[in-house]
Image (cartoon, rainbow, N blue to C red):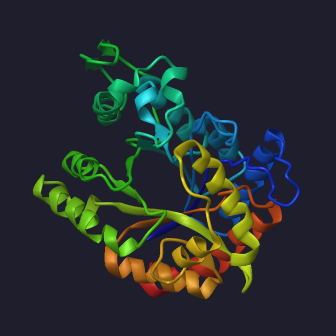
Amino acid sequence: MELGISMFGDLTPNPHTKQAIAPSKRLNEMLEQVKLADEVGLDVFEIGEHHREDYVVTNPQLFLSAAAAITKNIKLGSAVTVLSSSDPIRLFEDFSMLDNISNGRAHIMAGRGSFIESFPLFGFDLKNYDALFEDKLLMLLEVLHKNGTDISWEGRLTQSLKNVNLFPKPVQAQLPLWIAVGGTPASVLRAARLGVPIMFAIIGGLPINFKPLIDYYKENYLAAGHDPLKMQVGINSHVFVGDAKIKDDYYPFYAAQMDNIGKDRGWAPFSKEVFLNTARPEGAYFMDEPNEVIDKILQQHEWFGHTRFVGQMDVGAPDHKMIMKSIELFGTKVAPEVRKALKV
């Protein structure tokens, strides 16, 4: 199983000082963080796309290109690219460039996006939310499968192309594409039938409740005739590794961002009770000492048999030193023991 971290580039004001970090400082700290993730031997780093005041990354591939220049081995991908408001042709070109800069370490993770700011920003109608994703996903798959060569496409909500060739070509024989999903069975079924690797975001509640959905993906993937050896299932959850008091130290940062998002969505104020309940062994949060995080990853692997686990580590913009320590512990304490237990 591959192990990695993801980030959104949170700019939430510090709950203690009430000051938000400057975007330039946050971006440079994030580059130090991905460099450390590479140095401690983690397999994957992924970054999300947002168009809001509280997140700094609007273009994952731009940040990942900077990260590629200072890393050596870690795989670099989006998590997620909001495909519905993106151009599949531009994505192929950008990620192909990233693949060349990184010498074959790039991948795309496409999602519909839980935030909708990008739709009006780039001239897309929200009434086409599902249709845009469907059309652009099929177009992107066509481009990836043909490696940008001799592309002809009749689009419904995309441009039409005839015998188009795209450059540069990636270093990899084919750029990897993952589809990110929440808990929608239709999205799971689509990914399974297309034979595309899937990433489940499990960021609340009881993870065991996702087992029927994950089994549903596997059953339909095989029923569609896809190679079982190429099946890939990932889990993305909120992770923060530290000492015995890490929950107390991290809670103010996490709660600040949950309340910030909750203002737009009508959520009740985020409570310490909910936080601790979700961080218990059966819950979705991985916020604990290394041994507890190891046990939870291995328990979920028994349930799901997933091939990639990625922990989102910057929810609420915790201090740089806190994130660096969490990455260090995840890479030097958690990952080796998980690999040892799984014999990978």
Picture layout, residue 53 above or below residue 221: above
Give the quarter of the figure containing the N terminus: bottom left
Picture layout, residue 153 above or below residue 330: above
| Identity of the residue drawn at 42% across and 24% down | 89
> 116 or 190, which is in the foreground?
116
Q: How many marks?
A: 0
180 relative position to 103: left or right: left
> Residue 19 location in percent, x, y?
86, 49
> Residue 119 location in percent, x, y?
48, 26
Give the quarter of the figure containing the C terminus: bottom left
> 319 or 339, which is in the foreground?
319
Picture layout, residue 315 above or below residue 99: below
| Identity of the residue drawn at 59% across and 38% down | 50
Q: Is any part of residue 199 visible from this angle?
A: yes
> Residue 26 location in percent, x, y?
78, 47
61 relative position to 306: left or right: right
| Identity of the residue drawn at 23% across and 48% down | 186
| Identity of the residue drawn at 65% across and 83% down | 289
134 relative position to 252: left or right: left
> Residue 57 location in percent, x, y?
65, 39
In this view, the residue farthest toward the right is: 17
Q: Is any part of residue 168 visible from this angle?
A: no
